[in-house]
Image (spheres, rainbow, N blue to C red):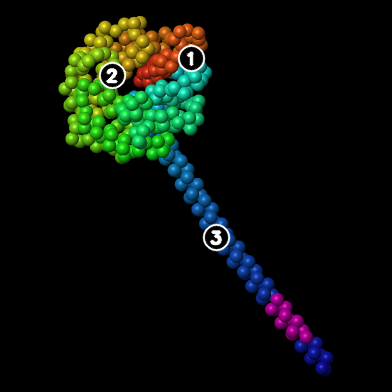
């Protein structure tokens, strides 16, 4: 009997252990299921977050691309003067119309690196930007050249070491083209004060200096807090000047400089006032033009004057002749000049003239895409 009770007791103990084991297993399974559910919820949340982030990145990317497209559109629709210091890439179709030895152009700078002028460097870098290629100079070399034209935080004449507007325009434009940190080279506040002082001393007789001044202010204002000059009416000062009475009056250079300044200074109403005053002078100039007697630079500036005065529809024949002269008459950076007395390969002034010719021709061509077949 005792054995029977003993065996029954053992069975109950085994059953208790079995039931306890089953309960533990169920608890474990429940814990695992709970953990799996929690992990699944976390995973779903992570997936939703990733998808939301992906959508956000895609949206930002789309918005950035739309912004770039809009900026390109606005730049194309604006004045070519907005290009100075921030040139777009020219259409390959247009660029290929020029007879340019691009290899010669790229390496043409090397003989002149130790004596290069700021103006030459400006043309060289601007042309590269227009071509849409990486510049054939390292940034350190460009900065070392710029630093020769900086004294006490301002762009200066290399000869006198005195601040001057021409160097200011070329220096600011180069920094802008390279997107270089300006404060590493110049003192921004000193430059602001210098330009403000020049505005307050504005003289309409100094037309060429005014061109450099107003373009420098335009570039400065595009990069830094704007220079205000409400107390000085530059537009009225200029429009009251009879440019034909200027010393060494040159109708091509002076009309281009004058209307470039007008374009940057005022809104459409006042600009129309300026056009009305000078339209007869412009027509007289255009009537006397024979493109065959002009330099490439002169042809380009006349084309830009026509653009500034909105005279394209009235001057289609002249435009065609000027473009033919500009695009077809000259081999730019031609190898054949080697050995001549005045070669872009050996003479710094000849090199500057070659650069200047190409720069102005490319600048003008931006405004005449539809005319160039």
- Dot 1 or dot 3: first in sequence order is 3
Does residue 74 appear in the picture of this structure?
Answer: no
Q: Magenta stretch: residue 147 in it?
A: no
Q: Nearer the viewer, residue 16 or 331?
A: 331
Helix, strand or loop under label 2: helix
Residue labelled with disc 2: 256
Residue labelled with disc 3: 41
Q: Which span of residues is magenta-colored? A: 10-21
Q: CA distance from mark 3 to mark 2?
A: 70 Å
Residue 345's place in the image compared with 4, above or below, is: above
Helix, strand or loop under label 3: helix
Residue 367 horizontal/vertical position (percent): 35, 20
State which quadrant residue 179 falls in. top left
Q: Which corner quadrant holds the N terminus?
A: bottom right
Q: Which corner quadrant holds the C terminus?
A: top left
Q: Nearer the viewer, residue 57 or 121?
A: 121
Residue 365's place in the image compared with 177, above or below, is: above
Q: Looking at the image, which residue sits at the far left?
A: 240
Q: Residue at x 27, y 21 (%)?
A: 208
Q: CA distance from mark 1 to mark 3?
A: 73 Å
> Residue 319's mark?
none
Residue 257 horizontal/vertical position (percent): 28, 20
- Mark 3 neighbour density, 10 Å: few (under 14) some (14–19) many (20 or more): few
Residue 100 horizontal/vertical position (percent): 47, 15
- Mark 2 neighbour density, 10 Å: few (under 14) some (14–19) many (20 or more): many
Q: Magenta stretch: residue 12 in it?
A: yes
- Dot 3 or dot 2: first in sequence order is 3
Q: CA distance from mark 2 to mark 1?
A: 30 Å
Q: Point out the frontmost of discs 1 and 3.
A: 1
Helix, strand or loop under label 1: loop
Q: Is residue 73 left or right of residue 106?
A: left
């Amino acid at each position: 009997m005792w054995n029977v009770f003993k065996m029954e007791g053992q069975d109950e103990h085994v059953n208790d252990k079995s039931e306890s084991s089953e309960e533990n297993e169920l608890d474990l399974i429940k814990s695992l299921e709970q953990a799996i559910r929690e992990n699944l919820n976390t995973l779903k949340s992570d997936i939703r977050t990733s998808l939301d982030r992906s959508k956000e990145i895609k949206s930002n990317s789309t918005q950035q691309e739309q912004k770039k497209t809009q900026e390109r559109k606005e730049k194309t629709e604006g004045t070519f003067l907005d290009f100075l210091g921030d040139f777009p890439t020219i259409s390959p179709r247009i660029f290929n119309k020029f007879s340019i030895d691009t290899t010669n152009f790229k390496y043409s700078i090397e003989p002149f690196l130790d004596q290069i002028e700021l103006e030459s460097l400006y043309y060289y870098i601007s042309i590269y930007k227009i071509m849409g290629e990486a510049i054939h100079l390292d940034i350190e070399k460009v900065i070392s050249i710029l630093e020769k034209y900086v004294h006490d935080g301002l762009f200066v004449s290399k000869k006198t070491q005195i601040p001057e507007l021409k160097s200011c325009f070329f220096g600011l434009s180069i920094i802008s083209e390279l997107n270089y940190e300006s404060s590493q080279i110049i003192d921004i506040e000193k430059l602001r004060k210098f330009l403000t002082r020049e505005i307050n001393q504005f003289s309409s007789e100094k037309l060429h200096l005014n061109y450099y001044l107003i373009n420098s202010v335009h570039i400065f204002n595009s990069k830094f807090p704007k220079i205000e000059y409400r107390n000085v009416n530059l537009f009225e000062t200029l429009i009251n000047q009879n440019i034909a009475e200027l010393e060494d009056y040159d109708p091509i250079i002076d009309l281009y400089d004058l209307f470039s300044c007008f374009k940057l200074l005022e809104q459409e109403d006042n600009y129309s006032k300026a056009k009305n005053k000078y339209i007869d002078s412009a027509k007289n100039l255009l009537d006397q033009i024979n493109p065959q007697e002009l330099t490439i630079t002169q042809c380009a500036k006349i084309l830009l004057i026509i653009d500034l005065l909105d005279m394209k529809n009235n001057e289609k024949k002249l435009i065609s002749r000027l473009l033919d002269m500009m695009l077809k008459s000259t081999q730019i950076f031609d190898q054949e000049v080697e050995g001549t007395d005045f070669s872009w390969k050996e003479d710094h002034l000849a090199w500057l003239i070659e650069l200047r010719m190409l720069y102005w021709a490319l600048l003008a061509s931006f405004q005449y895409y539809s005319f160039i077949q």
